Amino acid sequence: MKFNKNHLRILRHILHAYGQRLGWLRSAHPITLTFSVTSRCQSRCLTCHIGERSQSRQFRGQPDLSLAEIEKIFRSLGTVYFFNVSGGEPFLRSDLPQIADLAMEHLKPAIIHIPTNALAPQRIETICRQILENNQRRGNRIPLTVKPSIDGVGKLHDHIRGVPGNFVKLEETFVRLKLLEEEYPEFHLELGTVISRFNIAHLPEIEAYVHELGIESYRSEIAEERAEFFNLGDGISPQIDIYRKALQHFAGEILRNLPEKRSLTRITESLRLVYYDLAVQILERKTQVLPCYAGISNLHLNFDGELWPCCVLAYDHPLGNLRQMDYDVQKTLASPQAKEVLKFIHRKGCSCPLANQWYSNMLLHPPTLLKVLLKNIQIALKKRSTVSS
């Protein structure tokens, strides 16, 4: 693996996170910013109620952040490594290319990631193309990854997502984006599954379908009860023993296919293998098994200007509202409210297996990071021995 400027960038973010957690540094310099650009969503998922809530009077009274507001916030934050776009359904914002362009200008991310429910194939393709063209216009080659959701094959997917015909549109979205991937080297198509009690028994079928498509990167995460999703108490997560078996199966498939993958994919998949073990430990022990850097390494900006440490704590433990703090992230994080929330996390007042956060926690825990690197080296050596034989 060659050492480049992106490695130096993420190293600076890691060192800053250590300094901020220890109280040596005051300013925020997160690895990841997740931005829920809108609450609107056409889906009516069994695992998430954002779609229904977006139609309520409460949500209709809270407008999405405007481009002018977003620019002020991005300028106050500074650079990040990962820029994750979330929702609602991100592609319902027609100005999503402009939001991505503002991120490229002010946040200067190394990677931009956008999930989608795949309900508007042509719109998704058009917006992705606009983002990629803006990227090239700036002289950038920032990777853009887009991850349509697949929670089942055929009618099962439609049932879980709450929209008849969703699976057919997912297939159309896949074809359109696969062709886009061939056109733009910096564009990467992924697929992702939320593992819940509704589809846990169907994972082999889903996995087989994904592999038939020839997807380079496939992510699976456990369905979580989050304040963000308004699903607390819904009991959507699978039983821990069943989940453990499913992850063991996924891990075996990843190991079997990893030697054939590109070096970047091998690194991310090695990270995922270690995360699977940690996720099970968290669910079994119901505590943070490593120090959690939510609110330090990762920040979550909601559509209405609220700043969260993560999407699990979300509305229950906000750091503050940027509309009330002059759109200044650093000022908001220095507030008494934000400091109390960070103390709550530091004292292990919460525990969850949120993948986005735990990937950062792993990077910030040297023994765990060493496990990831050793696993990647083992895979690389296995590939070399296979090629030579």
Image: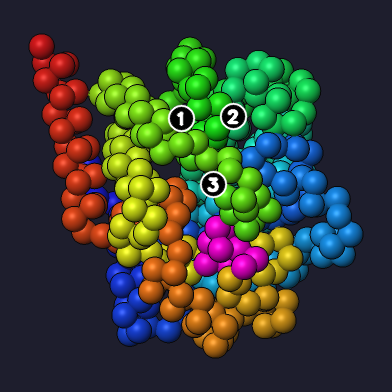
Q: Which mark is residue 224?
A: 3
Relative to the observer, which residue lies in front, 108 or 336?
336
Q: Earlier in the sequence, mark 2 or mark 3?
A: 2
Residue 60 horizontal side relative to residue 253, left or right: right
* Amino acid on which the number 3 mark rests in the picture: Glu
Q: Which residue is mark 1?
A: 218
Q: Relative to 218, is 346 above or below?
A: below
Determine the image quadrant of residue 76. Answer: bottom right
Q: Which residue is mark 2?
A: 198
Determine if the magenta segment contains residue 351.
no
Residue 97 horizontal side relative to residue 377, left or right: right
- Coordinates of residue 11 in the picture (x, y in percent): 30, 62
- Coordinates of residue 101 in the picture (x, y in percent): 64, 55
Determine the image quadrant of residue 251. Answer: top left
Q: Measure how far apart labels 3 and 1 are at the Cα level.
A: 19 Å
Q: Earlier in the sequence, mark 1 or mark 2?
A: 2
Relative to the observer, which residue lies in front, 329 or 264?
329
Picture quarter with the N terminus: top left
Relative to the observer, which residue lies in front, 366 or 199?
199
Determine the image quadrant of residue 183. Answer: top right
* Circle nearer the viewer, 3 or 1: 3
For image coordinates 63% across by 45% down, the residue present is: 234
